[in-house]
Image: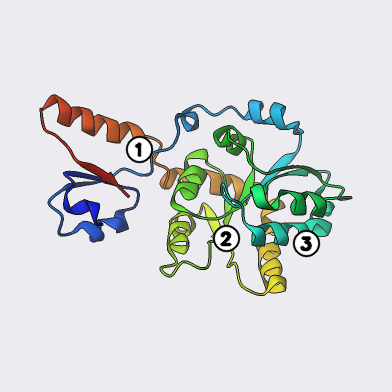
Amino acid sequence: RLAGRWADEIFLQFEESQGYFARSRASVHVVGCPLRGAFAHPDASRAVAELGLDSDKSTLLITGASSGSARINEAICRLLPKLESSADRWQIVHLTGLDNFKTVQDGYSGTRISHKVLDYYDAMADLFAATDLVIGRSGAVSVAEYAVAGVPSICMPYPFHKDRHQYLNAGKLVDAGAAVIVDDVADPEDRIRRLWSQLEPLMGDEDRRLRMSEACKQVARPSAAADIASRLLDLAHRGRPAGVTSR
């Protein structure tokens, strides 16, 4: 909002953000969130091969974004005895974050369900393409990736932001029918119960997951980066300098 005072062009992910720039003299464009180029051409087979996944099983991806989420990690480790009932049909890829890797790895010790526990994975476009259901946070980039990848999601918004913006981000997916929200409540037992009440039926309902995947198209904006570049090139060709900020 501060930089918007001097910008000529402002590019937004969400329509709702336009109100923050109502007094700006800039041209405001809602284009979505620009993502890395790999999301235009993901290759599920690369992730399957690199992670040693079983192509005959569905994949549940757990992620707390790049730094991980200790509370999501804990909930999944506590749910492993229940998840074992789906071991013949499902496998898990769990991205823990650097600080939580050893704890989560120990939590999977002895479980019968196939799993790959990693502290970090860079080729997320390929991994999302190999994923049938994701559990994760709902930061702005995360929800953009879920939507463009077409992956059904169980969003657990980070609960400590004063403006609760991750709930609003996830709400865009929920309104489209592409996601469900599970509150990351303080009580661990209640958190686990809430998560399992959404996770169990989704794992058992392929048709619903396919509908959620299709619904992602309603909110996905795969051309965001190209749209921004096109606008800037157009301005350059017309000889107009642009001071640019994005939100």
Q: Which disc number belongs to residue 78?
A: 3
Residue type highlighted by circle 3: Arg
SS under mark 2? loop
Labels 1 and 2 touching (C-beta < 8 A): no
**Res 171 → quadrant:** bottom left
Residue behind mark 2 = 156
Residue type highlighted by circle 2: Met
- Residue at position x 35%, y 38% in the image: 224
Relative image position of residue 9 (x, y in whole percent): 20, 43
Relative image position of residue 61 (x, y in whole percent): 66, 46
Q: CA distance from mark 1 to mark 3?
A: 39 Å
Residue behind mark 1 = 224
Q: Nearer the viewer, residue 203 or 170?
A: 170
- Residue at position x 58%, y 50% in the image: 67
In the rendered structure, which disc, 3 or 2, sits on the residue that comes first in sequence?
3
Q: Nearer the viewer, residue 4 or 150?
A: 4
Labels 3 and 2 touching (C-beta < 8 A): no
